[in-house]
Amino acid sequence: MLHRKLCKSRIQSQSNRDQQWDSYHSKVTSAGFGRLGQIVGCILAALLPAYQLQAQVIEPPQLNISVYGELVSITWSEVADAEAYRLYYAPFPDAEVIESLVLGLTPSLSGILPVQSAFYVAIATLVGGGESAISNIETFFIETTEFDPEIDAITEGDWYRPGLEDSWQWQLLGEVNTTYDVELYDIDLFDVPITTIQELQSQDKKVICYFSAGSYEDFRDDAGQFSAAILGEPLDGFPDERWLDIASNNAREMVLSRLDVAKNKGYDGVEPDNVDRYVNASGFDLDADAQLAFNRFIANEAHARGLSVGLKNDLDQVPELVDYFDFMVNEQCHEFDECETLQPFIDAAKPVFNAEYADSFVDDDNQRNSMCEDANSRGFATLVLPLDLDDSFRISCR
């Protein structure tokens, strides 16, 4: 970790830049930022050598920071040709010491910090021995250990947004059949090689990935990173899968880790599963607000990474979540007469990707045709699929 000198001594020791600093400082203070503006200006002055040498040729990232209780998530925009990024941070409000950390190419960083921690943060791009100007400077303060469900949705950004007319294929087991003429594939986060993702994208298809956000699966690559303390009751019908304590930092850290895996593998979006724990016997006393906080956290962090994100089931909270998610993935709304609850997504011009598994929709043409007529009238992209999602058959209503 590289230690920076105190702002005051650094500015004084670089008299050849005093005039530029004075000009910037006067602009900041005249804008009415007062002490905060002086501190931010001090940080900029401490980093000015990189700004002077490389600002015209290397693009700086755009920084975003979100705080969820004690969990801090830092993300930034990717810069073409970047070889690494440098994170700058200093204690708020005094900024007496500025430190930096050279990171890799994954444009995100997260961690748990104690209550009352407060920092300034900025990021810079490293290319060919040079360094960009710093990004926007952000501050954060850890006020509480609690997760707030009333967080604003991240809605502005450059990520994939599927359309109402888009068709899809959903396969989670077996070698992925890449031959379907559809706009969107939904496949497994861990089991599918990057070459398959790239093959689909070379065919102008978008590719999103499935992972379980609210449960533990003992066969996953990262199973060892889950704390035993956050593992609850088995899921109904899945004895080797257990509900998570979604109010824990560990559960949220695992979501961030998996979002980073999705980003690094090149997926266009994510389909997080098991995000309706509060209506199931999980072994934890958590209410609907806890689920809202968790689901909104997932959506915002996916968007912060430039990933599209779909809401999986959680029908009771659709009105509270539709603004946060880009599409809906639903199972069996026709079989259980629940399709009306999905209408807010259609009304918001966000597609509903629906899967039905009932034998009657496979074997009985009349029942299937009636179901498909209803699905099409609602604007849903409905598939009749095997419960194992292994591509053993596929019937599309469109």
Image: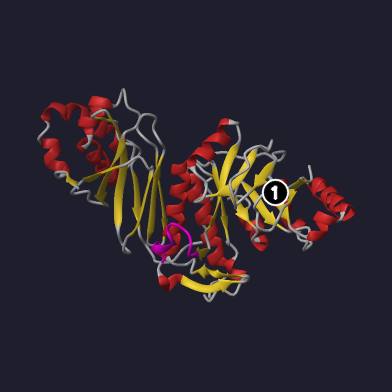
Residue displayed at 43% across by 48% down: 260
Residue 368 location in percent, x, y?
84, 53
Identify the residue at horizontal 35%, vertical 52% (top origin): 140
Q: For the view shown, which residue lies furthest in the top direction? A: 56
In this figure, which residue is indicated by the disc labeled 1?
Answer: 352
Q: Amino acid at mark 1?
A: Val
Give the camera-side residue of 42 and 120.
120
Mark 1 crowd level (few <14, some 14–19, many ≥20, 10 Å Cα): many
Check the picture and name the quadrant holding the C terminus: top right
| Residue range corresponding to the magenta coloring | 217-226
Is most of the magenta stretch helix, strand or loop? loop
- Inspect the magenta stretch and tell me whether residue 155 lies in it: no
Q: Nearer the viewer, residue 361 or 26?
A: 361
How does the figure colour the protein chain or chains? secondary structure
Residue 43's quadrant in the figure? top left
Is residue 158 visible in the rendered structure shown here? no
On the question of residue 137 being in view, the answer is yes
* Residue 35 located left or right of residue 307: left
Where is residue 231 shown, x and y percent of the image?
47, 71
State the image quarter where residue 115 is shown. bottom left
Q: How many marks?
A: 1
Q: Is residue 220 within the magenta segment?
A: yes
What's the residue at 77%, 63% (across, down)? 336
Considering every residue shown, the one lying at the far right of the view is: 366
Q: Position of residue 379 (x, y in %)?
A: 77, 45
Dot 1: what SS?
A: strand
Residue 159 at x, y percent in the picture: 54, 39
| Residue at screen point 60% across, 64% down | 276
Q: Is residue 187 above or below residue 128?
A: below
Towards the viewer: 327 or 115: 327
- Residue 273 sits above or below residue 29 on the image: below
